[in-house]
Image (cartoon, grey):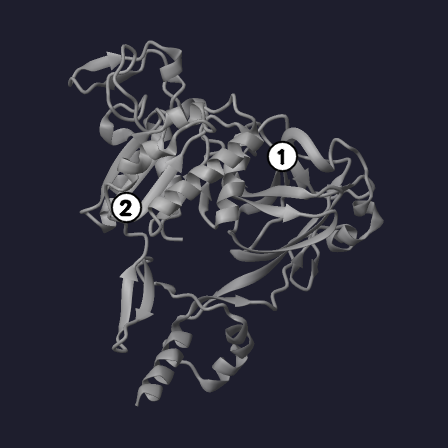
Amino acid sequence: MTNGIAKKYVIALSASVKNLFDPSDDVNAGSMKATSDWLVAGPGSIVEGTDSTAYSSAVSDTNIGNQPAIAYYILKVPLSEDKMIKEIKFNCSASGSMTFVIGSLDQANKLIVESSFAVPVSVGTNIIPVTQLLKQGQYLGVKTPGLMPNINTSLQHDYTWGIESSYTNPLFKFNSWSLGLAFKVVSLISITNPFVRKTDLDVLQDQIDNFQPSNIWKSPDGKSWKVGISNAGQFTAEPVGVYTKILHLGNSMLKSDIAAHWWGNWGMAAKTRNDDYAHRFLAKIKVANPTAQSWEENIASWEIDPVGYNKANLDALLTAQPYDLVIIRVGENATATAAPTYKDAFRQLIAYIQNKIPTARIIIGGMFWMNIGLDNAMSEVATEKGLTFVSMDGLDISGNRSFVGDVVQGDDGQSHTVDLQGVANHPNNAGMEAMAARLFAVTNS
């Protein structure tokens, strides 16, 4: 009887599975070439190019190997539907870490980065296995300073776009060289028919055999659930992304003491307490869990001296509640610290928190005032420890910042006028909302 129930349950799940991988996908778009399911760009095949001496030999110290400049380089390859990137292929003339970005272009051709991830790279040909969603209208690219794929100055096509010396200016097409980068994608297919014939299951057998099972499922309303089975054989489903006790660690953008130039004990430049990013995040969490609570702690003293800071100062806070989510978003006050030193100190801070709160999920937020070296350091630590890193890249724009003359409320119930540029540089309500939205977007992942 038990085996019969289990078999029936497996068949039912197979019939309603969403987002099964279809590894046989071939993609063609315009002049874009497809070799099996490797996305490549013509007139020459990038896949072939990554294996050729044109990409594996040094072309210029300034734009292959270790690129010291601030830059984005993307393959502007259009997709007709959402895909999953499974492998990335390229040659590199140096070893270390390479940072990839996924984002879309706005009307001005500026790159809006929606996610980033770092991978270890060796000299020569690299084929990196990944699992990254690439939606229609999004593009894969590389962020520097840091390592980047080799290029080819004798092969030009319409797909290598980028911007150098800036992260905020519009991207343009490179006409004198091409980026030696290819990526393998698989389609996402949705099965909505509740009845499945044996022949249908036979067709999907290879996919099912190779499918990595997950106990995270989505209900029709889009909510995520963790499916399990109890010792009594009963199926269970717990909501995912429903957190009850949330701890935020940050700086003045999270919580600022009242001073002559600031009047509220919350994120600086937010008009009210409920407008800073921690409270905007909490409001989003409360839609699914009205009983959720959050605690905010300013640890700018760690940023100022990340090596000498006594982490035991955090013990009372870290053990005060059974937190199920910790969000750490720091870095803006640490610019005097070299990136390697900062990375090691940040790694130790994360390890200390994990030791004190081993059951809590940890999300690491990137920097609003961008410092690429420190931001990359935190992203790399997140990758090392299997944690989620949320980039804030591109948010530091005039529409997301306060200004001298802006009016905010204080704890005294009165209106106050921002009169210090240091306060005005902080995110305003729009900036705080954008930060909260990016953090909240990963809570169901």
Tell me which corner region of the image, top left, top right, bottom left or bottom right, holds residue 403: top left
For the point 80% across and 44% down, the residue is 155
| Amino acid on which disc 2 is placed | Tyr
* The quadrant where residue 262 appears: top left
Q: Nearer the viewer, residue 240 or 352?
A: 352
The circle on residue 323 is: 2
Vertical placement of residue 211 versus 121, above or below:
below
Q: On the image, numbered disc 1 is attached to which residue?
A: 144
Give me the residue at 53% from left, 73% from top.
207
Label 2 Cα crowd, 10 Å radius (few <14 / some 14-19 / many 20+): many
Residue 144 drawn at (x, y percent)? 62, 34
The numbered dot on residue 405 is none
- Residue 374 x %, y %: 52, 31
Q: Residue at x 57, y 62 (%)?
A: 186
Q: Are marks 2 and 1 in contact (CB under 8 Å)?
A: no
Picture coordinates of residue 31 (x, y %)? 70, 52
Give SS at disc 1.
strand
Q: Which corner quadrant holds the N terminus?
A: bottom left
For marks 2 and 1 on the same chain, the one whose residue lies earlier in the sequence: 1
- Disc number lying in front (2 or 1): 2
Determine the secondary structure under disc 2: loop
Q: Is residue 159 left or right of residue 412?
A: right
Judge left or right: residue 358 versus residue 41.
left
